[in-house]
Amino acid sequence: MKRLPLLISLCVLLGTAACSSAGVENGPLSGSARFVGDDKIDDIIERSTERISFGRSDFAVYQVELQNQDEDDVQVEYRARWFDADGIEVQSVTRSWKKLFIAGRSYQPVTSTAPNMEAIRCEVEVRLSEY
């Protein structure tokens, strides 16, 4: 009979440990994509299917699909900015503009992985490529 309270305590402890995750401790995940620069990008590119979750490495991963609404091919640039639970931007050596080619009437996914486990909110900036 003395084993029953010990067994219940052990089950509660294991259940709590199984539910814990670095992201849950750091805050809820969120992500968004926004256009910057030339206003005509709004007429060409559409954002769709935004997702954010924890990847295999327990780092947050954000993905958004960019759809080219035009018949012509277009080249855009994007970069991701990650923030911690307090809204402070997390520095990343990979925060530079990356080029992306999107064929006419097609879409391309843009994916960004958080630079560390503290990063829980992502903002992807997208602009028309100047070249």
Image (tube, grey):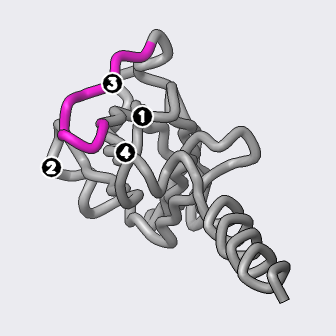
Residue at the spot 80% in from the left edge and 77% down from the top edge = 7
Q: Which residues are magenta?
A: 84-92
- Please name whichever residue, 26 or 49, is drawn nearer the observer in this view of the structure: 26
- As helix, strand or loop, the secondary structure at mark 4 comes to strand
Circle on res. 90? 3
**Residue found at the very far bottom of the displayed protein:** 1
Type of amino acid at the residue the image marks with label 3: Val
- As helix, strand or loop, the secondary structure at mark 3 comes to strand
Name the image quarter holding the N terminus. Answer: bottom right
Q: Position of residue 98 (x, y in %)?
A: 49, 25
Type of amino acid at the residue the image marks with label 1: Glu
Q: Quadrant of residue 83?
A: top left
- Please name whichever residue, 74 or 63, is drawn nearer the observer in this view of the structure: 63
Residue at the spot 54% in from the left edge and 54% down from the top edge = 63
Circle on res. 118? 1
Q: Is residue 77 left or right of residue 113?
A: left
Q: Position of residue 85 (x, y in %)?
A: 27, 44
**How far is disc 1 from disc 3 in space, using C-alphas?**
8 Å
Residue ID for mark 2: 39
Type of amino acid at the residue the image marks with label 2: Asp
- Number of residue marks: 4
Q: Position of residue 25 (x, y in %)?
A: 43, 51
* Whether residue 71 can be seen here: no
- As helix, strand or loop, the secondary structure at mark 1 comes to loop
